[in-house]
Image: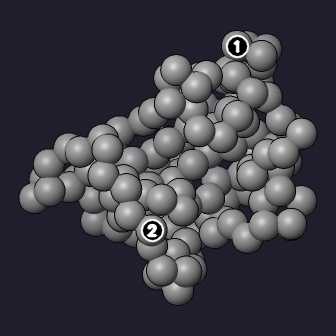
Amino acid sequence: MDCIFCDILSGARKGHFIYEDDLHISILDKYPIDTGHSLVIPKKHYERITDMDSDDVGKLFSVVPKIANAVLSATGADAFSLGQNNGRAAKQIIPHVHIHIIPRYNHKGTIWTKRAIEEDSELTTLAGKIKDSLT
């Protein structure tokens, strides 16, 4: 199996980590829709959320408010959107369950399709700010 998130978890690829516990990680999206776009990912590989049992789904989603609050605090975003895709037709690019936390800014509007490649140094700095905002 070739999975980018499993490679990040194993250390074979770099990820900009902002949170980790026994079951989950959260990293910055490498191709963010907006500044602070983060992913919450279970450490155990599941391709789709329907492959998970309900307890594991609940545990995954229970991490989201903590990460979202830290992202809002670190970025000054006004709000956030959540996204969770399952299967290629739903635009799931990486076949490993993950939840998108997408910060939203009043002055920018809500765009779903814009993606940019952030500089590695920018992602490192932002990841540090979000980690520092975790309570």
| Crowd around label 1: few <14 · some 14–19 · many ≥20 (10 Å) | few
* Residue drawn at the location 48% of the way across and 59% of the way down: 31
In the rendered structure, which disc, 1 or 2, sits on the residue that comes first in sequence?
1
Viewer-proximal residue among 87 and 23: 87
* Residue drawn at the location 66% of the way across and 40% of the way down: 94
Residue 26 position within the rendered picture, expressed as x and y whole percent measured from the top left = 64, 54
Q: Left or right: where does residue 75 sit relative to residue 91?
A: left
| Crowd around label 2: few <14 · some 14–19 · many ≥20 (10 Å) | few
Residue 71 position within the rendered picture, expressed as x and y whole percent measured from the top left = 43, 59
Residue 3 position within the rendered picture, expressed as x and y whole percent measured from the top left = 79, 46
Viewer-proximal residue among 5 and 128: 5
Tag of residue 50: 1
Q: Left or right: where does residue 4 sit relative to residue 99?
A: right
- What element does badge 1 sit on? helix
- What element does badge 2 sit on? loop
Name the quadrant containing residue 57: top right
CB under 8 Å between callouts 1 and 2?
no
Q: Amino acid at mark 1?
A: Thr
Residue 81 position within the rendered picture, expressed as x and y whole percent measured from the top left = 35, 39
Tag of residue 86: none
Residue occupied by mark 2 = 117
Q: Left or right: where does residue 97 sit relative to residue 76?
A: right
* Mark 1 vs mark 2: in front: 2
